[in-house]
Amino acid sequence: MFGAEDNGDEATVYLYDVIVSDDYWGGVSTLSFAKQLASITAPTINLRINSPGGDVFAARAMETAIREHKSNIISHIDGQAASAATYVAIAADTVKMSEGGFFMIHKAWSIAWGNADDMLQMAALLEKVDESLVATYANHTGKDAGEIREWMAAETWFGAQEALDAGFVDEIVTVPVKNQQRWDLSAYAHAPKIAQENEIKMKHQTEMQHMKRMAALARHLP
């Protein structure tokens, strides 16, 4: 889901999908996001996020669009901000998180093919991306780079209070359970299991949708 609402004084942008480099992949593309954001003149923009992440470079471009916008932007992590969605979220002037939300950081990963030289080149690129992300998280939180690296290596899922304590978010908010959305997080190794008795209305995805999402997540890097 991607869209925006604008009443003149305040606007809302929804990032409720995978972050992709092109609309072909079926999520929220950099171009669509940047164009939508640039068209908004309201002094305050609420960026509502529930995303499992996606393409690292597409997310970086979204991050830049947010930082360069003249409006006061408040990001709201309604369900989760995982992987690439995290640095989109923390690009805002203020970061709020629902008490039942999750914030996940991990080392960059990709799918590669070719000979040994190709694999070494990909490994070198992944290391550069990791260091770039470490710098972004460290600058935002004030945490030591070494601690950030450890969190990324462990694929760390922060609950709301943990994210607040770590400095990723500024405020925890209470939201109705019915507003939450759950994603299939099988692409990640340490995703938390959400209790079934929460009676959250799930967004059921077909096998094709699952494959498209996995393909989009695999496109973290070219």
Image: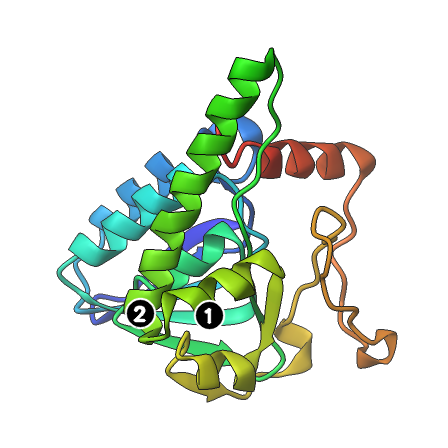
Instruction: State how many labels appear.
Output: 2
Which of the pair 137/57 is nearer the observer?
A: 137
The residue lying at 30 percent from left, 61 percent from top is: 91
Q: CA distance from mark 1 to mark 2?
A: 13 Å
Say if residue 46 shows up in the picture. Answer: no
Amino acid type of the residue tagged 2 in the rendering: His
Q: Position of residue 176 (x, y in %)?
A: 62, 83
Left or right side of 162 for 57: left
Residue 143 in sight: yes
In front here: 168 or 130?
Answer: 130
Question: Residue at label 2?
Answer: 140
| Residue at left offset 72%, top offset 53% | 185
Color style of the picture: rainbow
Please tell me whether residue 9 is drawn above or below residue 172 in the rendered image.
above
Q: In this rendering, would 140 be left or right of 211?
A: left
Q: Nearer the viewer, residue 93 or 145?
A: 145
- Give the image location of residue 134, x and y in percent: 39, 57
Residue 14 left/right relative to 93: right
Callout 2 secondary element: helix
The circle drawn on residue 147 is 1
Q: Position of residue 171 (x, y in %)?
A: 41, 86
Q: Position of residue 68 (x, y in %)?
A: 16, 53
The front one of 31 and 80 is 80
What residue is at 48 percent from the left and 60 percent from the top?
149
Q: In the image, what residue type sits under mark 1?
A: Glu
Q: Earlier in the sequence, mark 1 or mark 2?
A: 2
Q: Residue furthest top?
A: 115
